[in-house]
Image (cartoon, rainbow, N blue to C red):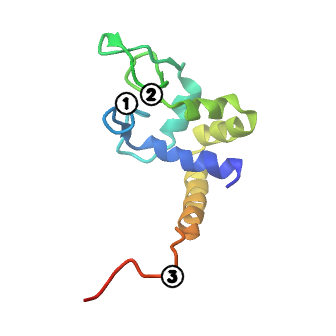
Amino acid sequence: FNDQEIVALLGAHAMGRCHTDRSGYWGPWSNAENTFSNEYYRLLVEERWSPKVTHNGKPWTGPDQYEDASGQLMMLPSDIAMIADPEFKKWVELYAKDEDRFFKDFSKAFAKLLSLGVPFAATKPWYQFW
């Protein structure tokens, strides 16, 4: 995958959230975690992100992550890396401004991801009939 496709695929972070009991990270990437949109990119470029140091009034003991000023939204180090890298940042900024372009590019990159599939050994089937 090229830079554009990687940035487009990471737009899936617009949906969902991290859970400390599963990944160690905490919180949603956006305020509309059940909506597929370009909000992830808009927040990434418009908000100020700082390292998370507390959680519910206690020191943060999870893996390094970033939060917005409210402490309610999060970004992973990989998300922040996209705005630090000029080649990735140009795509982040484009998708922040143009949701239709994001949808178009995400569709292509996701179709490519699915078409690559998962290789399985062809020597023996995973199922058995008795």
Q: Amino acid at mark 3?
A: Thr
Q: CA distance from mark 1 to mark 3?
A: 43 Å
| Closer to viewer: mark 1 or mark 3 | 3
In the rendered image, the vertical position of residue 121 relative to residue 92, given as above or below:
below
Residue located 40% across and 24% down the image: 62
Q: Which residue is mark 1?
A: 27
Residue ranking furthest to the left: 130
Contact flag, marks 2 and 3 (Cβ < 8 Å): no
Q: Of callouts 2 and 3, which one flags the residue occurring earlier in the amino acid sequence? A: 2
Residue located 59% across and 57% down the image: 104
Res. 76 mark:
none
Q: Which residue is mark 3?
A: 123
Q: CA distance from mark 2 to mark 3?
A: 44 Å
Q: Position of residue 127 (x, y in %)?
A: 34, 80
Residue located 53% across and 69% down the image: 117
Q: CA distance from mark 2 to mark 1?
A: 6 Å
Q: Which residue is mark 2?
A: 74
Contact flag, marks 2 and 1 (Cβ < 8 Å): yes
Q: Amino acid at mark 2?
A: Met
Q: Position of residue 10 (x, y in %)?
A: 55, 45
